[in-house]
Image (cartoon, rainbow, N blue to C red):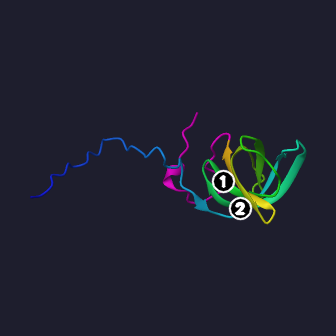
């Protein structure tokens, strides 16, 4: 006996898994400068690189001690564009640096200067 299958309707909305990321991650090493205040409330400026990027932020490696929810500014060294970010993840330090997830305060699909960004990098306009 065959199982009955329903044809999928083209007009049905695509329902995304709530655990799914908002945009695809891309392994990309972009030279950046991170500025802000450390956990001792002292100004810092650090040159580093991204490990992974997406339309909503990046995963970076940083020696400066910062805390989750804190704001920092990223500067793309190739374009000199800046973007305000908030720290959303702080990993354990290894070799004096910790991996950190940063989220743009306002999403920007063009900040990383990717020629062919994934289709899900379309950011709704406000």
Q: Main secondary structure of the magenta part?
A: loop
Residue 97's place in the image compared with 21, above or below, is below
> Is 90 within the magenta?
no
Residue 71 visible in this rendered orientation of the protein: yes
Residue 78 visible in image: no
**Residue at the spot of label 2:** 30
The residue indicated by pointer 1 is 58
- Asked if marks 1 and 2 touch (Cβ < 8 Å), the reply is yes
Residue visible at 52% across and 49% down in the picture: 21
Q: Is residue 111 on the magenta stretch?
A: yes
The segment highlighted magenta reads 105-126
Q: Name the residue at 89% across, 45% down.
A: 43
Q: Residue at 78%, 45% (x, y): give it.
A: 72
The CA span between labels 1 and 2 is 10 Å
Q: Residue furthest front?
A: 92
Residue occupying the far bottom of the picture: 95
Residue 38, compared with residue 76, is above or below; it is above
Instruction: Give residue 4's position: percent from left, percent from top.
Output: 15, 52
């Amino acid at each position: 006996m065959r199982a009955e299958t329903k044809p999928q309707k083209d007009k049905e909305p695509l329902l995304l898994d709530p655990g799914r990321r908002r945009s695809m991650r891309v392994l990309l090493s972009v030279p950046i400068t991170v500025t802000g205040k450390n956990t001792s409330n002292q100004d810092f400026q650090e040159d580093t690189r991204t490990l992974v990027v997406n339309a909503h932020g990046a995963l970076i490696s940083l020696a400066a001690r910062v805390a989750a929810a804190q704001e920092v500014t990223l500067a793309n060294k190739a374009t000199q564009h800046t973007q305000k970010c908030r720290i959303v993840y702080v990993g354990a330090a290894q070799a004096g640096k910790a991996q950190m997830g940063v989220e743009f305060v306002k999403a920007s699909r063009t900040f990383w200067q990717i020629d062919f960004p994934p289709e899900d990098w379309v950011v709704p306009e406000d």
